[in-house]
Amino acid sequence: MIRAEYQRFMQTLVDNSVSDDVRKIANLVLFNLDTLIPLSTARGQRIIKIVELAQLNWDRLSTQIHTDPVQVGAQTSSACALKKISVGPFRGFAQTEEFDLSNKIVLMYGPNGTGKSSFCEALEYGLLGSVAEADNKRFRDQNKYLKNAYTNNFEAPEIIGDNDTKIIANEPLYRFCFVEKNRIDNFSRIAAQAPAKQGELISTLFGMDAFNSFVRNFSAEMGNNHIDVEGLKSKELSSKEQSLAGARAQKKEAEDALKRLAGEEQNLANQYRAGLTFPQMEIEINGNGEKAGAISLLENELAQPVNLQMGLSLATLQSLGNSIRANVSDLASKQQILQDASEQVSFKNLYEAVRQTQNLNADICPACKTPLTSTVVNPYTHASSELKKLQHLAQTQGVVEKLRQDLNVSLNGVSHIINSCCTFYSENVIYAYRLAPNSQVSNEWWNSLNQSLPEGGTPWQHLESQVKQIEDNDKEIDQIKQIRAKKQQDLNILRQYNGLIIKIKAQHDFAQQRIVKSQKTIENFNIENAQLISEAKSEQVVVKRNISIASSYADFVVRLNAYKNDLPIRLVADLSVSVVALYNAFNRNDAANERLAEVYLPLAQNQRLEISFENDPAKRFDALHILSEGHIRCLGLAILMAKNLKENCSLLIFDDPVNAIDDDHKEAIRRTLFEDDFFNEKQIILACHGEEFFKDIQNLLPREVASQAKLFSFLPRLGEQHVRVDPHCRPRNYIIAANDCLDRGEIRNALAKSRQALESLTKGKVWRYVNKYGDSNLSIKMRSATSPIELYNLTTQLKSKIAKNDFGDSNKFIVLTPLDTLLGMNGNSREWRYLNKGTHDEADRAEFDRSTVIKIVSMIEALDSALQ
């Protein structure tokens, strides 16, 4: 517990506000925890030991926070229910025992000394990684405590979760799953102690006593009587060094400037290129006597001229060639069309001429001068009509004209390319195909470009080859221009870097000069005081380290105490509402002036645990002063169980709660655990030494739930060295037991268990049912003051209350029918006689009718189911 809580404290030191030296002290304590825990403040035992360890190990101590990864990293893990556990050798277990825990309710019964605590400690060790009782009994080596005394051996218990994976010990995750009777006992005893002791109420309840004691035994600080934090020689030297204040200040300022410049140099070098030093960068940029720098090389390269580009493209040439061929072909085709229609062309021209003369004399025929009124056909109208018929000839003539123009443009483009190639290549096979100035391109010239040459190929093919070469050359010039542009950019950047280099070197030289000047003054002083300086230097190393140790220790102790004092706040924050609800559930039968309205948990030093009651919520009382010991125990149990709810623990584990709780509260606590809604989603593992408590829990549960619960009985040892466990112990639920007796043919025993079941149901569940929906005030006659309530009288009155017309439950017949069957008229039914006869012994009586007994058991089962 101490180690786990201390490791949680260490996590508060991860913050950047905590110095490395404080972390060193924290690690020193952690690494020597077993040595320091037994030491106290008496005669300075612990502080002397810490000083000794610190001076011996200071330079080797880590500044990193060292903790168990499980304690730190697994706190966000999800807990799961338990499926099984294998125990042994371990404490009372001399050999391995396996427990099937695969149900939400696991109940264990056994007299004191039969091994229940060993089982609970196995759960504690498997889930938390340690056993608190070992710390309480001052076992430094827990393995010695956990060994079986007879085999002298110990194996860690193996716990399997409901997801079929092995559960790894995780103290932060499972620490609030356990409710221990010893802590509740200690909590109740605080009421009789001094008020100062009551300030540790919450820490005691959560088992933090050992940790609090451990923290209190740290002295607040290291005095000069523990560790030397002064130096005489240093004081004398400091007095003399006042005369050197100016020189030292100048030197310090210059040295700081050099450090700053060194950083700037390296940053500049890293900015220029990662991994390069400042001198390497300077040589690379400016060069040295052996090689030129990057600036000089780039300037020389950029001074070289670049050839001009011709701007020719093979794709353009080929496009022109394709266009020419297409135009020549289309032109020939269209001209042939016009030639074939030459007669139509003549008529077209005639009609055009006729139409044009219409404006001159529109009343006579232009050919014969006959008045239009005397002609057979109006010549102008006829000409317009015929021209419309010959419109396609006009369109074809337009296309021919457009083709001639496009062809001339393309041929001129080819001529321009030929001229460019002849300019680029002085000796050129296509030189003969250049056109003279003012010469016009023609089809014959174009055809000559496609004629085969004696040496092979055509002029056009030579032209394509030359254009391709010129185009490639232009691309190379483009690349050269791009490279030159990049080099110009690089040159500009290098010149900027060179300017920064010059600036930094100038500042460096100035600082160096100041250091030399100041150093000379200091050296003269050092020569005169050499011996004193040597003595002070030797002394100062130790003093400086001691000051670091002392100051960091004081800071550490302040932080550790603050953490301890804040523990109650962290432990009980936001628990008040749940604590009140649970406490009132434990005391559900109390009057309003005994039920809590509010609980005020102590969250700071010297605060008291206060409460107020439902009848006067505004008035506060000191809980430890006004509550009985039994109620104080209930309050402690409520706080622990509220914490379990707050942390969303999947488990609730009780180790013998019978010892911690008085008889007046046991029934209400059983109902809170197994009947109310608080812990419906949790797996409950409960071990007790009271057989009646064990029995009452099973009969409180619905039969279906009780039949699924895992039951274990720890048996008294009969000379064995090993814990005896009955994993198939007989159930104490009366209805289940009655059915088991029927299955084994034990009719009388089935009747006895049935009567016990009916007694349990009527005095518990039926009476509460009547109280919920009707009048539960009964008039019961008793034979004497000490006589128990007669079952028939109680059952009859409860039945009559349920049968009333004003009873509040509309589904009352599911309860009333089984009672009617069992009671009959005036208690004279065979079933009721069987319930009586099956309980009392009679010699030579007639055999019980099995079908009647089965009916009795089924009616009791029906009654139990109806009351859930």
Image (tube, rainbow, N blue to C red):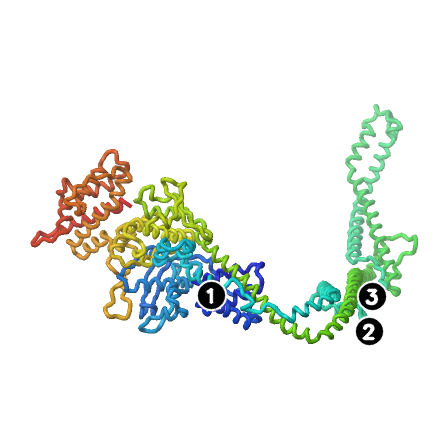
Kindly identify the residue that appears in the image at 18 percent across and 45 percent down.
Answer: 789
- Does residue 472 appear anywhere in the picture? no
Count the marks.
Answer: 3
Q: Is residue 272 above or below residue 332?
A: below
Pointer 1 local density, CA inside 10 Å: few below 14, some 14–19, many at least 20: few
Quadrant in the picture for residue 718: bottom left
User: Toward the viewer: 603 or 867?
Assistant: 603
Label 1 residue SS: loop
Which residue matches tag 3? 301
**Image quadrant where one finds the N terminus:** bottom left
- Which is more N-terminal, label 3 or label 2? 2
Label 3 residue SS: helix
Pointer 2 local density, CA inside 10 Å: few below 14, some 14–19, many at least 20: few
Label 2 residue SS: loop
- Between the C-alphas of marks 2 and 3, the distance is 20 Å
User: Toward the viewer: 853 or 609?
Assistant: 609
User: Toward the viewer: 476 or 731?
Assistant: 731
Q: Look at label 2 and name its amino acid.
A: Gly
**Residue 519 at what x, y percent from top left?**
75, 70
**Residue 147 at what x, y percent from top left?**
35, 70
- Which is more N-terminal, label 1 or label 2? 1
Q: Look at label 1 and name its amino acid.
A: Thr
Spot the residue most to the bottom. 531
Instruction: Name the mark nearer the viewer: 2 or 3.
Output: 2
Spot the residue most to the top. 373
- Which is more N-terminal, label 3 or label 1? 1
**Residue 6 at what x, y percent from top left?**
47, 62
Q: Which mark is residue 289?
A: 2
Which residue matches tag 1? 41
